[in-house]
Amino acid sequence: MEKDISTEERIKQAARKVFQEKGYGQARTRDIADAAGINLALLNYYFRSKEKLFDIIMEESMQQVFGLIVGLVNDEKIGLSEKIDLIVNRYIDSLWENPNLPLFVLSEIQANPRKVMEKAGLSNHIIVGNYLYKQVQEQIDIKGIKGLTPLHVFVNIVSMTVFPIVGRPLLLSMHSPMTDEEYKDFVDGRRTLIPMWIKAMLKMDE
């Protein structure tokens, strides 16, 4: 029997939504089948277990989070300034379309970091040891900046990009009333502000 690709993809879309909302522990295969509009037997035909389906969704999610910049960080033809701009914009574009993705990935990494990274085919070299890491370290050394490491810079880029999107409910409650258009303008404004802050930290404008 040949598998119907559209059905398989519908199951994955439903699983992605259920896993992101409930996490692995609380999600049930019946929840996923209901969300996909199919019966449980059909889900089990395509994906033999919840664990197998979760592994596929997690791998795709990790690749979505980190795959955006894997090629970019190791591109030796792109300077540090442009690279910072591109990373920020790529993350904002991706997270705008899928705001639940970061919390899902981070919560599962926290629960079992080694397993998640191995399942996604990723290593610590995605953050430490890439060419961007080298570029940032060279800038730190040139400017003689004390107490700053490339990891600090990376964490700042990610946190300043991610938080305004995953923290939308908090931001809206702190700045009330904020319309959807005002919120979008706020996030879009950070496309310029975050690179400016990172470059100032690295003393790139001096």
Image (cartoon, rainbow, N blue to C red):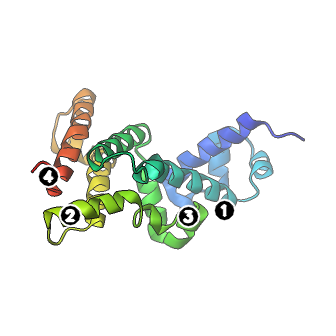
Which mark, by number, is residue 140? 2
The image shows residue 31, relative to residue 121, as above or below, that is above
Q: CA separation, marks 4 and 3? A: 42 Å
- Residue 60 screen position, x and y as percent: 57, 50
Q: Earlier in the sequence, mark 4 or mark 3?
A: 3
Residue at the (46%, 46%) spot, across then down = 68
Q: Residue pushed farthest right?
A: 1
Q: CA separation, marks 2 and 3? A: 43 Å
Amino acid type for the residue under numbered disc 3: Gly
Q: Quadrant of residue 36?
A: top right
Callout 4: 10 Å neighbours few (<14), some, many (20+)?
A: few
Amino acid type for the residue under numbered disc 4: Ala
Q: Earlier in the sequence, mark 1 or mark 4?
A: 1
Amino acid type for the residue under numbered disc 2: Ile
Residue at the (17%, 72%) spot, across then down = 147
SS for dot 1: helix
Report which residue position mark 1 lands on: 51
Does the rendering let one see residue 112?
Answer: no
Q: Nearer the viewer, residue 206 or 174?
A: 206
SS for dot 4: helix
Q: Residue pushed farthest top?
A: 181
The image shows residue 85, relative to residue 153, as above or below, that is above
Would you say the residues marked 1 and 4 are in contact, meaning their CB atoms lie under 8 Å apart?
no
Report which residue position mark 4 lands on: 200
Q: Nearer the viewer, mark 2 or mark 3?
A: 2
Q: Earlier in the sequence, mark 1 or mark 2?
A: 1
Q: CA separation, marks 4 and 2? A: 12 Å
Would you say the residues marked 4 and 3 are in contact, meaning their CB atoms lie under 8 Å apart?
no
Amino acid type for the residue under numbered disc 1: Glu
Which mark, by number, is residue 25? 3
